[in-house]
Amino acid sequence: MEQILYPIKVVAKRTGLSPHVIRAWEKRYDAVSPHRTDTNRRLYSTEQIERLTLLRLATAVGWNIGRIAQYPTDQLKSLLSDNNASDHTPTRLVHETPGKRTASDNKISNPEYYLDACLRAVEIFEVEKLEHMLSEASVYLSQPVLLDQVIEPMMSTIGERWREGALRISQEHMASAAVRTFVGHLRSSYETTQSAPVIIVTTPAGQIHENAALIASITAASEGWRVTYLGPNLPAEEIAGAVVLQHASAVALSIIYPAGDPGLRDELLKLRHQLPEEVAILVGGKGMSSYGDVLDTIGAFALDNMQDFRQVLERLRLDLN
């Protein structure tokens, strides 16, 4: 009998994990190895769905995904059925009542706790709860983990659910406003010297979703860059003008939705023409893959994630010194 395979959206619903987390666990920890179609689309077997579900349940009680990602499925089942075994006790848990977890366990070791809590707050339209969970996460998690494993996947999931009709646009706007304020406070906490290189962060014309750009701005600030954040949806000439006025060394662009916009191709070509030759262009976001040819033409850095962004920023700083 031919094996039945499932797309990532189905897997997300069955496992309770977001597509972003599934891809991250695959890429970072090799937790599963999905089948690939000729168009590079991921397809998962029933056994892989079971494995991902077990991993989610294990992380929910305090296990570190990096430690257990390579455990065989049978060992994951044993781990979940016998939390009291000494050789299976999560090293980062606070040992109180055996076999039980506390809220502090989750806060210390599990960014998925905050991701789930934030998504629930958006679903029930509780902005104060969302703001509280973001603030609490900033205390318990390092900033790279907070950005990469909470805020970025949260906004990605919200965007996907909005496009699927599972969330109202008012919910998406509420979450965006909360994240915009939160990230703004984070960015303002960084002090940079006047000698630090300047980066312009924005989204090009027609790209109105700014959350990934906001995350990029705080990431750049944490890497020692002076950041000028221009907001979303700017034409090429305005971006180029800001670069000249700020004597910027780089431009970071977020491309999310819509993908395949012919007008954006022209904007990117125009931007490269109007920028000084030495100014680097860094491009990321879910919609980026639709513009691979023009990104190659303009010599842009195509970034798959924030880790790539950090590495390129570090390389550029070394080249500037």
Image: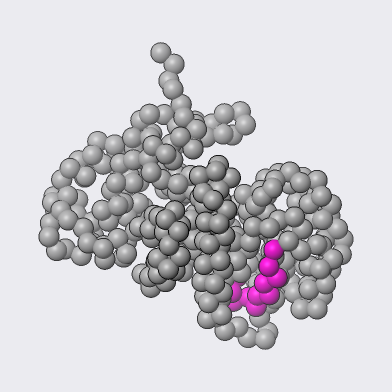
Give the answer, above or below, for where 16 lies relative to 63.
above
Q: Quadrant of residue 268?
A: bottom right
* Bounds of the magenta segment: 220-232
- 229 in the magenta segment: yes
Residue 103 in sight: yes
Q: How far from the left and from the top, in percent, is residue 2?
A: 44, 16
Residue 296 in sight: no
- Pick the residue in front: 78 or 264: 264
- Pick the residue in front: 151 or 176: 176
Q: How far from the left and from the top, in percent, is residue 44?
A: 45, 32
- 67 left or right of 171? left
- 272 in the magenta segment: no
Q: How far from the left and from the top, in percent, is residue 91?
A: 23, 60
- Residue at 61% across, 69% down: 217
- Residue at 80% across, 62% down: 235
Determine the residue located farthest toward the top in the rendered image: 1
- Residue at 21% across, 58% down: 101
- 2 left or right of 241? left
- Residue at 57% across, 53% down: 169
Q: How far from the left and from the top, in percent, is residue 265?
A: 80, 50
